[in-house]
Image (spheres, rainbow, N blue to C red):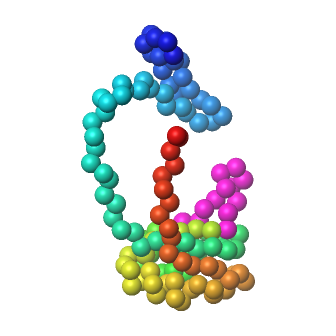
Amino acid sequence: MSSIEEAEKAVEQFNRYDLNGRLLTVNKAAPRGSRLDRPPRVFERAFRVYVGNLPWGVDNARLEQVFSEHGKVVEARVVYDRETGRSRGFGFVTMSSETELNDAIAALDGQSLDGRAIRVNVAEERPRRGFF
């Protein structure tokens, strides 16, 4: 962009533009150095496990049911392919305490769930993806 007017025109033209079923968000960038420094975000420690080799038929409710036998489940989520809607064969479960997390790992890692030996281990924090 070579001018402020062109930038404003681009924002007006493309903000909330539908691109393959998704709405774009377009706005003008702030000048360098003008952004206020934000304090780093504080994240509550999550007691999350990765669950791999899930049978295709396992959904969130079934995953929660299996893990609830080992403590309070805060969240159970199977990961699905956005294009096909089919399970990707893995998911994540958040337990309410470290003790329950460790109990679930010890009890369920390698166990058979609907005929498949599931893998259960502590979920690694994934770095946020950036554009650059």
Occupied quadrant, residue 73: bottom left
Q: Is residue 111 left or right of residue 132?
A: right
Q: Compared with residue 131, is residue 10 higher up or lower down, i.e. above or below?
A: above
Q: How many marks?
A: 0
Q: Compared with residue 26, is residue 130 higher up or lower down, i.e. above or below?
A: below
Residue located 27% across and 48% down the image: 39
Q: In this view, does 35 lie to the left or right of 9?
A: left
Relative image position of residue 26 (x, y in whole percent): 48, 27
Name the residue nearer the viewer: 110 or 80: 110
Magenta span has 78?
yes
Q: Compared with residue 49, is residue 11 higher up or lower down, i.e. above or below?
A: above
Camera sees residue 9: no
Relative image position of residue 59 (x, y in whole percent): 61, 68
Relative image position of residue 80 (x, y in whole percent): 64, 59
Residue located 67% across and 63% down the image: 88
Occupied quadrant, residue 113: bottom right
Residue located 70% across and 49% down the image: 83
Residue located 54% across and 22% down the image: 14
Relative image position of residue 108 (x, y in whole percent): 57, 85
Camera sees residue 46: yes
Magenta span has 1?
no
**Range of the magenta residues?**
76-89
